[in-house]
Amino acid sequence: MPLFDIAVIGAGPGGYAAALRGARKGARVCLVEQNRLGGTCLHRGCIPVKALYGTARLLAGMRQLEEHGIRIEGFRFDLKKALRRKDKVVSGLEKGIEGLLKSAGVERIHGRAVLEGPNRIRINAKETIETRSVIIATGARPLIPAVLAKSPGMVLTSDDFLALESYPERLLVVGGGYIGCELAGIAALFGSRVTLVEQLPELLAGLDRQAVREMEKSFRELGIEVIKGSAVEGLGEGASGVRVTLVGRREKPEVDRVLVAAGRFPNSAGLGLEQAGVMTENGAVRADAGMRTSLGNVFAIGDVTGILQLAHVADHQGEVAVENALGGNAEADYRIVPTAIFTFPEIAQVGLSEAQCRESQRDYLVGTFPYQASGKAQCDGDARGAARLLASPSDGRLLGGTVFGAGASQLIAEVAAAMRGGLTAGDVAHLIHAHPSLSEIIKETAADVLGASVHKAVRRGRPLEPTSGARTE
């Protein structure tokens, strides 16, 4: 029986990156996966969605061609070709991961893994391997509410949506989180008539409200109907499709398909965790700051932990788990975790929001800057959006930031890096940025925290008084 230093179960973005890190630190590593390399992120999540988003963004940009003096006669969108491109992107990245694992000397084992103890893993109920440490990285799957699970033929999960070869003419999206909002925008630009239903009173709860309002404005322009404060009560057969009964609403709309984007559930079943002594809670594997489970040498990372279901968090947790599996004492740090939502416009956020500051009664300084005042945004013809930064009144250090507009997912990285380095709003404002560039938006927003943005009209003698966290707006 072969002996490994680390056995990683699951080849998603957390798992395969952990395997690579372990191997490059000199450990003997195996990676066990019953499906394809890359996991949900590569095949049924981040990458295929963003590949489709790239196509949708180009379609949205076609509406602005006339402003640039460009006229295209006989324009036609070939959905099947766009879907083939998506598959090609996924396939190419999967081959890249395969090459990295091979070059690092990671032993790939194809099959289903079951823990038989702290040091033993059975593969496909046949082969047994021994290992000093185990890292569980089995991810999560789409959650289907019970009321919708009763009508499987009418319901699509995000996995199903990404496997479609054509899009329904009428689509109901259940869930106004980041998955639902991203897919709603893509489907609308691809020609579907979309209705989005969210049980909470607001979409994208926890994000900057101004950013969400701008996204909702774009939804209206795309013809997306948004229903908030309601939920699907039942599905049935209608005269021309699926008849939907909504809580608190008399009308019963008919659609062709229902897409469920109401969260994800950890993939912890069937791994032998309970028998091996690994504790779970509501399906999630319990892991501490060092990613250790209740069983000494078994670690857990990524969506299966239920901590923060983001691919980049899984990658960070994998780094921590590998360090500790090899004798270290690292801890995961979730204080600075950027989030990017690929809607129209993009929304990105990191650190504290104004709502969180108010809830904790924390004083803060705030600076804002609109894309309309950016020369680069105007040149690109995409000047929709704004940035917002929060800073501590006592020392000027950045507390958080939001960007919504073109390139928001890239611009937020500067804010996160500044927070990580303990920089103040003044430090960012005085850093020379390339001109013209969208990054100048961050510089000007930081300057506005100090009341010193030269490209934003402000009242003379604007007092630099902190906003009281105890005050509501």
Image (cartoon, rainbow, N blue to C red):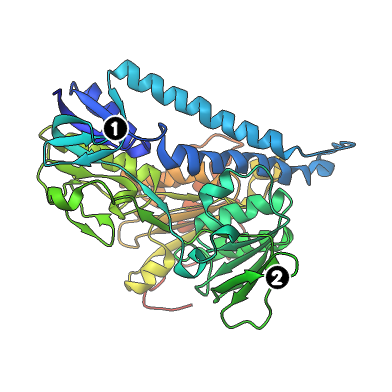
Which residue reaches farthest top? 103
Residue tagged 1: 32
Q: Is residue 452 visible?
A: no
Q: What is the crowding at mark 2: few (fewer than 14 residues within 10 Å), some, or many (at least 20)?
A: some
- N-terminal of the pair, mark 2 or mark 1, is 1
| Vertical comparison of 65 with 444: above or below | above
Residue type pointed to by label 2: Gly
Q: Quadrant of residue 112?
A: top left
Q: Where is residue 431 in the image (x, y as percent from the top left)?
A: 44, 39
Q: In this view, does 189 lie to the left or right of 277?
A: right
Q: Disc 2 and disc 1: Cα gap in Å?
A: 46 Å
Assign a secondary structure to mark 2: loop
In the image, 79 versus 436, the foreground residue is 79
In the image, 432 versus 272, the foreground residue is 272
Residue at (29, 32) in percent of width and height: 32
Q: What is the crowding at mark 1: few (fewer than 14 residues within 10 Å), some, or many (at least 20)?
A: many
Residue 113 image label: none
Residue at (90, 36) in percent of width and height: 73
Residue tagged 2: 238
Residue type pointed to by label 1: Val
